[in-house]
Amino acid sequence: MSSITPFIQPLLKGAAVTLHVMILSIIVAFLLSFLFGFMKLSKWKILRMISSIYIEVFRGTSLLIQLFWLYFALPMLGVQLSAMTAGVLAIGLNYGAYGAEVVRSSIQAVPKGQTEAAIALNMTTFQKMRIVILPQALLLMTPTFGNLTIELLKGTALVSLVTLSDLTFQAMLLRTATMKTAEIFGLLLIFYFLIAYPVSLGFRWLERKLSVGRV
């Protein structure tokens, strides 16, 4: 135990950075998921087209290349981003594209009879979405969003490649300094699991709450 004690403090510092990147990226990804998910369902063709381009580009290209482009290529065009900003934007944009498809497919999966009932009750489009469709769609979205959030957490390891001192960056520094690969990467696995497991439990709890009163 004493052999790994010196590694705990640097990894805790890295974990704080990882959590910071993860939380900000989740906010960006969820906002983009709903924005472009709704745009994909819009009656206006231009909005559907913009949403489709965003989704296909960010799902069809590597997150690593997107990160490098934002951090290394944009400065050549006169736009300088900090490592934190580039990391959060790359991760948020990438997972937001996947989330947008989750939002679209979940809303479309709500039985059409529900929509017809809302129309029969003379609800406005906003009331129909807020009261009838979205509560049912959220239940369908939750398990997939839980999986995407765990994947997003694991994706934050890439920010170490743009000099952010996250968990992976700190582990690589420790490994280079001590050459104790097994101990350091064993601790790294434990740290990531300790972050991911509460997230997983949180989404399971949310799924149960949303399921209350539903058959």
Image: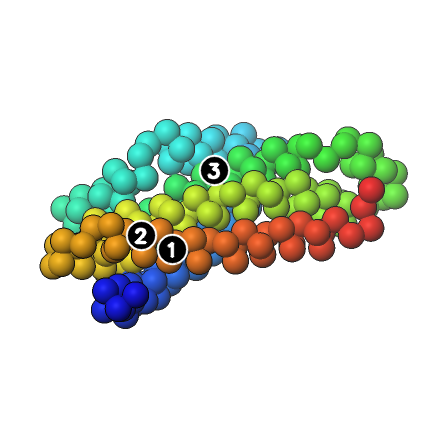
Compute the Cα span from label 3 to label 1.
Answer: 27 Å
What residue would you read off at disc 3?
A: 98
Q: Residues within 10 Å of mark 3 (few under 14, many from 20)?
A: many
Q: Amino acid at mark 3?
A: Tyr
Residue, disc 1 = 190
On the image, which quarter does residue 145 sit in? top right
| Residue 130 x/y as whole percent | 72, 50
Residue 33, compared with residue 17, is above or below; it is above
- Residue at screen point 53% across, 35% down: 101
Residue appearing at x 37%, y 63% in the figure: 20
Of label 2 and label 3, which has the lower sequence position? 3
Three-letter residue code for mark 2: Gly
Residues tagged 1 and 2 counted as in contact (Cβ below 8 A): yes
The residue identified by callout 2 is 186
User: Label 1's element?
Assistant: helix
Residue 15 as seen in the image, left or right of residue 211:
left
| Picture coordinates of residue 79, whole percent (x, y) | 21, 52
How busy is the neighbourhood of tag 1: few (under 14 within 10 Å), some, or many (20 plus)? few
- Crowding at dot 2, Cα within 10 Å, few <14 / some 14-19 / many 20+, comes out as few
Q: Residue furthest left?
A: 177
Q: Residue furthest front?
A: 1
The residue nearer to you, when weighing 205 against 130, is: 205
User: 98 or 19: which is nearer to us?
Assistant: 19
